[in-house]
Image: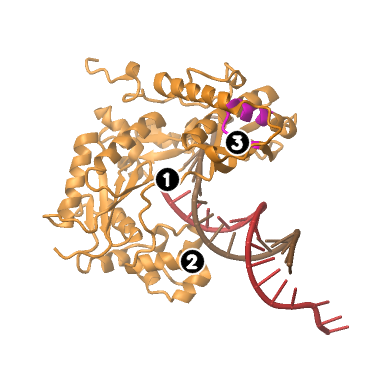
Chain colours: A orange, B brown, C red
Amino acid sequence: MPQPESLFALVDCNNFYVSCERVFNPQLENVPVMVLSNNDGCIVARSNEVKALGVPMGEPFFKSKEIVEKNNVRVFSSNYTLYGDMSARVFATLAQFTPEIEIYSIDEAFLNLSGFDRHCSLTEYGRRIRQTVKQWTGIPVSVGIAETKVLAKIANRLAKRSPRADGVLDLTRPGYREKALEKTNVWDIWGIGRRHGQRLIDKGIITARQLRDIDDNAIRKQMGVVGVRLVYELRGTTCLPLELCPPPKKGITSSRSFGRAITDKQEIKEAVAAYISTAAVKLRNQHSSTRYLTVFLMTNRFRDDEPQYNNAATVELPVASDNTEELMHYAEQVVDRLFKQGYRYKKAGVMMTGLVPTDQVQTDIFDGADRNHDSKVMQALDLVNSQIKKGALQIAAQGSTQPWRMKCEKRTPNYTTSWKELVNVRA
DNA sequence: TCTGGGGTCCTAGGACCC
DNA sequence: TCTGGGGTCCTAGGACCC
């Protein structure tokens, strides 16, 4: 079968968080289900039934309480431990189909389908991927196939919407690309957000097909090189290659809104210490150390009846570090600089930037720390927390009462990662 | 009363240097 | 009225993604 030189499949899980909940509770099939963000704040995943009720993505939960009650919508706090584990299972299944896979987000991956022998059409192949993932993991996916990533995204979107496509759409078939571009609006293209979308509409460019046919200089002027690449992709010329192994992160952030407003400096310090602990684990997992540490504090920006204070401060560490205790020590000093009495704080966070590989850290001849010993302590800490029980070992600065902890009142059990929380089939 | 969290890339402009 | 021309590095802000 003749084949284009580049060929991508985008596999995307349908309503991923909702689907994860459904795998372990079949009674949720065919009824409206939604999943909330951290702190039960916003709606981040909706079943098709909820979408049909007109509830928008990202809406604050309290705004849709009425619809929820009237339609008996099942509501869940997000359970990232469960979703992360399910995600890994989906990707392991996809890896059976090609060695070249780019994990793009928790619920989608690009596959390189070019250059290997199949004894069936691309559509049939896509169907096989879909069926296998469903069978092995319980998660329904959609598959979009095309010559470039941007086109594969468009294919996937249409595959989800069109009942005839039934979850799989191959845009390399004669005439399909043209029709798909005609049917897709510019603001639904991957890489066109609200801003650029509006500017294009103002110029009379409404469909993806019109954008494809735009003059190169015009698009460069409006959207820079990013826009030029995007238009080329729409024309079928690959500009966005598959990223097989993700490069290490250049910065690591950990932040949370509090379950309730906080006024006490000590409590802020404990929360910040907990965020340091989370971020430092990520740092060590990618074998990086940080040169800069930023802490930020915020009041509730939605409360215009309350005084507002948002501020951030950064320290440069004398020696780049990945040591939780040391980072906590600096973070505490920053909080002392930053904190002002008399505000109701709603959120805090830490950012680590200027990351360097830990084995290339420039040491300081006046550095008194025994870094070799410290790193062994951290290794032991990570081992216990990852192998035995998350949070089993903590640094005391994180506090034990944690009144700032976020709300998650509707969380389901960790069916797949905790022995105590396995599904009980006899119940 | 209740409003998520974590990233990336690109560009423009300033500081600084020769 | 004239007031170089490049180059690099850094930062802030914009725009986008899931």
Q: Is residue A297 visible?
A: no
State the separation of the CA atoms marked 3 and 2. Answer: 32 Å
Q: Amino acid at mark 2?
A: Val
Q: Which image quadrant is residue A311 in? A: top right
Instruction: State the residue in front, A133 or A279.
Output: A279
Q: Which residues are magenta?
A: A319-332
Q: Is residue A95 above or below residue A282?
A: below
Number of the front mark, 3 or 1: 3
State the separation of the CA atoms marked 1 and 2. Answer: 32 Å
Q: Earlier in the sequence, mark 1 or mark 2?
A: 1
Disc ID at residue A350: 3
Question: Which chain contains the residue that carries disc 1?
Answer: A
Instruction: State the residue in front, A66 or A11.
Output: A11
Kind of element beneath mark 2: helix
State the separation of the CA atoms marked 3 and 1. Answer: 30 Å
Residue A274: give x, y in percent of width and height. 57, 26
Number of the front mark, 1 or 2: 2
Question: Which chain contains the residue that carries disc 2?
Answer: A
Q: Is residue A346 visible?
A: yes
Quadrant holding the C terminus of chain A: top left
Residue named by callout 1: A56
Kind of element beneath mark 1: loop
Residue A144: give x, y in percent of width and height. 27, 54
Residue named by callout 2: A225
Residue depicted at x 42% and y 40%: A44
Kind of element beneath mark 3: strand
Marks 1 and 2 share the same chain: yes
